[in-house]
């Protein structure tokens, strides 16, 4: 059975914007496993962004940092936008959300500021 890429991408975006990062990951992972080429790489970056936020919110700072770095690298070639998603804005918002973690000393345990949690905007 072929999956509807656009519908599942949109469903994942809605879950992401509802801050349901694990559920978003589940939707996009299913789609990622059935997709190839550039779209699969885009999904991999989006998956890593969602799970980075999930880990940060739950206090897994090592996992959050690793996935933040991965999504930044993977999504770079797709900026400023791809598949109707504003990836330049996501990049800026992820940087702002993760700033405290990126600047933290080893003995610090910063928390994800709820006011800085990114939303995944659309772009024509």
Image (cartoon, grey):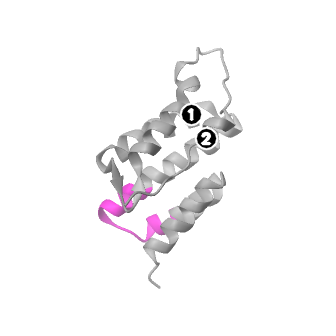
Residue 12 drawn at (x, y percent)? 55, 62
The stretch of residues the image draws in magenta is 29-43
Residue 30 shows in this picture: no
Residue 120 drawn at (x, y percent)? 51, 52
Q: Is residue 85 above or below residue 48?
A: below
Residue plotted at (66% across, 36% down): 115
Q: In this view, does 16 lie above or below 114?
A: below
State left or right for residue 12 relative to residue 88. right
Which of the 4 image quadrants contains residue 70?
top left
Disc number placed over residue 97 in the picture, else none: 1
State left or right for residue 67 relative to residue 61. left
- In this view, the residue farthest toward the front is 124
Q: Of the residues under marks 1 and 2, which one precedes in the sequence?
A: 1
In the structure shown, which secondary structural element does the residue marked by tag 2 occupy? Answer: loop
State left or right for residue 85 relative to residue 116. left
- Is 103 contained in the magenta span? no
**Residue at the spot of label 2:** 117
Residue 11 drawn at (x, y percent)? 56, 67
Q: Is residue 95 above or below residue 32?
A: above
Q: Distance between the residues labelled 1 and 2?
A: 6 Å
Q: How crowded is mark 2: few (under 14 residues within 10 Å), some or many (20 or more)?
A: some
Residue plotted at (30% across, 63% down): 37
């Amino acid at each position: 059975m072929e999956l509807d890429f656009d519908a599942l991408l949109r469903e994942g975006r809605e879950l992401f914007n509802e801050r349901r990062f694990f559920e978003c990951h589940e939707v996009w992972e299913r789609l990622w496993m059935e997709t190839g080429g550039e779209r699969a790489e885009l999904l991999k970056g989006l998956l890593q962004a969602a799970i980075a936020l999930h880990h940060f919110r739950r206090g897994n700072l090592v996992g959050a940092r690793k996935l933040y770095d991965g999504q930044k690298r993977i999504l770079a070639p797709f900026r400023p936008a791809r598949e109707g998603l504003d990836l330049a804005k996501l990049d800026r918002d992820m940087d702002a959300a993760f700033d405290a973690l990126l600047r933290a000393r080893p003995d610090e345990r910063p928390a994800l500021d709820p006011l800085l949690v990114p939303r995944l905007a659309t772009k024509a």
